[in-house]
Image: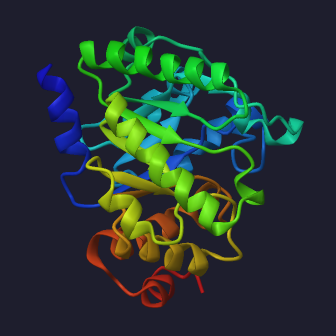
């Protein structure tokens, strides 16, 4: 459908995309930064390209975030996987369809995110995860909704750099072949090769909170220079003491190739 291409064009209309994620409560509950949802809209700078959230968050705070002409695009996560339940130490990688693309569209979503985990140690589980992704992706496309496919491996922190690189490179390509319009995944060594092996734009995620806002800016610059089509930062923004200033700095670093230290000084982050 035509809206599919319009949403994608708008998403990348100003260059590399910046997405702020605060969907952590779907798996970890009220972690710092998202423990008071009513305060989230005050932490989002309206010039970022997208906000990744749960359907519940879109229902309750979406109108404050995404109701203006130039608001960030609302992106909704519609499947659920044990792989994200870090506090419960889950590692199986089972994934299910939690919400339908139709419901997400009804809420006002303009993109949906569907995650995929493979190499779970169980071939039947891997096949079921593929089926879940493919079914949700095809249904979203029938509605004109672009799909961000997220590849998230099991026990990424325990992987060697070589293993993580290999799995992300293969997983990203699989997501493209299954129909993902955009991919969100880990930044790895030799990231340029991950990008070269996947025709779909790849957004690099931020991961755990880094030691400072300046380190977050440097990490974002590194990701973009390695070929990422954008970034998805969650805890590195929402747990910052100055989230608005950090996003303003990110806009200059990611979209204008500004020096991270200069941007950090400009917006009072150091």
For the point 39% across and 87% down, the residue is 259
Q: Quadrant of the C terminus?
A: bottom right
**Residue 144's image quarter?**
top left
Say how the picture is coloured.
rainbow
Q: Is residue 231 above or below residue 7?
A: below
Residue 143 seen? no
- Position of residue 138 measured from the top left corner of the image (x, y, whole percent): 33, 16
Residue shown at the point (35%, 60%) measured from the top left: 195
Q: Residue at x 51, y 23 (%)?
A: 130
Residue 243 visible (yes or no): yes
Q: Residue 254 appears in which quarter of the rendering? A: bottom left
Horizontally, residue 155 falls left or right of residue 47, namely right
Direction from residue 2 to residue 179 in the image, left or right: right
Vertical placement of residue 77 versus 31, above or below: above
Q: Position of residue 65 (x, y in %)?
A: 44, 37
Most extreme residue toward the front, as rendered? 123
The percent coordinates of residue 134 (x first, y second) are: 42, 20
Residue at 69% x, 24% y is: 94
Q: Position of residue 76 (x, y in %)?
A: 47, 29
Q: For the image shown, how many numbered marks are present on the structure?
A: 0
Q: Quadrant of the N terminus?
A: top left
């Amino acid at each position: 459908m035509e809206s599919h291409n319009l949403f994608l064009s708008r998403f990348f209309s100003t260059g590399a995309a910046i997405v702020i994620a605060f969907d952590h409560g779907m798996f970890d509950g009220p972690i710092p930064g998202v423990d008071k949802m009513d305060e989230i809209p005050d932490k989002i700078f309206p010039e970022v390209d997208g906000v990744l959230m749960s359907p519940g968050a879109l229902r309750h705070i979406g109108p404050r975030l995404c109701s203006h002409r130039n608001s960030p695009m609302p992106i909704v996560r519609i499947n659920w996987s044990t792989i994200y339940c870090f506090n419960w130490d889950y590692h199986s990688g089972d994934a299910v369809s939690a919400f339908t693309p139709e419901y997400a569209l009804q809420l006002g979503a303009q993109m949906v995110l569907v995650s995929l985990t493979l190499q779970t140690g169980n071939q039947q589980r891997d096949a079921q995860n593929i089926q879940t992704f493919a079914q949700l992706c095809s249904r979203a496309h029938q509605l004109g909704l672009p799909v961000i496919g997220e590849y998230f491996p099991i026990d990424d922190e325990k992987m060697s750099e070589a293993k993580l690189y290999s799995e992300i490179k293969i997983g990203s390509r699989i997501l493209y072949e299954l129909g993902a319009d955009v991919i969100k995944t880990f930044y790895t060594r030799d990231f340029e090769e991950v990008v070269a092996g996947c025709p779909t734009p790849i957004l690099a995620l931020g991961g755990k909170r880094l030691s400072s806002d300046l380190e977050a800016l440097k990490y974002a610059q590194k990701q973009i220079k390695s070929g990422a089509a954008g970034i998805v930062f969650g805890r590195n923004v929402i747990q910052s003491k100055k989230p608005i200033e950090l996003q303003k700095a990110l806009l200059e670093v990611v979209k204008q190739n500004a020096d991270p230290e200069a941007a950090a000084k400009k917006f009072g982050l150091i």
